[in-house]
């Protein structure tokens, strides 16, 4: 059989929404929420990749947006995979999320790889305006049962 069987997929959608502080302390909290959400439902999306990409989105929101107001994390589990969104108060679109930059990131710099990771490891990603700023998101597909770690 190609792909996961229907019984390997969550029967219905589930979602979580949480306000996070506009500090770096939000990053491990966001990772833990994604890990717990995927584990609780035995969801078939890749948890390690979801955690990594969530950490990148949250860190970007904290670092590149002004203000003390909270940012918001939304995790949605769907039969086809999962979608993670981070809402922040800045309406400006994120750098080069949906289009590649010219050249490779400088290997000696600490920054400049987050959006590349999101573009490369997600099945799709993007951003959209919201009433209070923007939402930046990524999607991960269901991982077939035979490819999941035991």
Image (cartoon, rainbow, N blue to C red):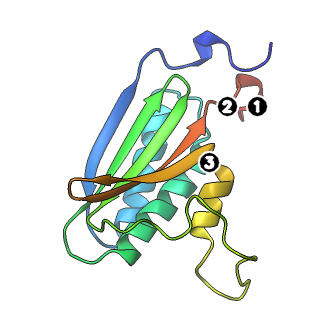
The image's mark for residue 133 is none
Marks 2 and 1 close (CB-CB < 8 Å): yes
Which label lies toward us, 2 or 1? 2
- Res 61 visible: yes
Vertical relation: 15 (above or below) 69: above
User: For the residues marked 3 and 2, what is the alpha-carbon distance in whole angstroms?
Assistant: 12 Å
Mark 3 and mark 1 lie on one chain; the one further toward the N terminus is 3
Which label lies toward us, 3 or 2? 3
Which label lies toward us, 3 or 1? 3
Question: How many residues crowd around disc 1 within 10 Å: few (fewer than 14), some, or many (20 or more)?
Answer: few
User: For the residues marked 3 and 1, what is the alpha-carbon distance in whole angstroms?
Assistant: 17 Å
User: For the residues marked 2 and 1, what is the alpha-carbon distance in whole angstroms?
Assistant: 7 Å
Marks 3 and 2 close (CB-CB < 8 Å): no
Q: Report the residue at 56% width, 57% height from top.
A: 52
The local secondary structure at tag 2 comes to: loop
Marks 3 and 1 close (CB-CB < 8 Å): no
Question: Which residue was labeled with disc 1?
Answer: 147
Question: Which residue was labeled with disc 2?
Answer: 143
Q: Nearer the viewer, residue 53 or 126?
A: 126
Picture quarter containing residue 135? Answer: bottom left
Question: Which residue was labeled with disc 3?
Answer: 122
Q: Report the residue at 74% width, 83% height from top.
A: 107
């Amino acid at each position: 059989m190609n792909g996961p069987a229907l019984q390997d997929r969550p029967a219905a959608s589930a979602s979580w929404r949480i306000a996070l502080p506009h500090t770096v302390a939000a990053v491990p909290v966001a990772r833990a929420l994604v890990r717990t959400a995927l584990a609780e439902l035995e969801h078939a999306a890749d948890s390690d990749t979801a955690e990594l990409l969530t950490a990148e989105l949250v860190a970007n929101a904290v670092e590149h947006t002004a203000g003390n107001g909270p940012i918001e994390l939304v995790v949605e589990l769907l039969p086809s995979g999962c979608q993670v969104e981070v809402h922040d108060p800045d309406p400006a679109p994120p750098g080069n999320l949906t289009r590649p930059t010219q050249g490779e990131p400088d290997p000696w710099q600490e920054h400049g790889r987050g959006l590349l990771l999101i573009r490369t490891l997600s099945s799709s990603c993007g951003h959209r305006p919201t009433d209070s700023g923007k939402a930046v998101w990524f999607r991960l597909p269901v991982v077939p049962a035979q490819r999941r770690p035991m």
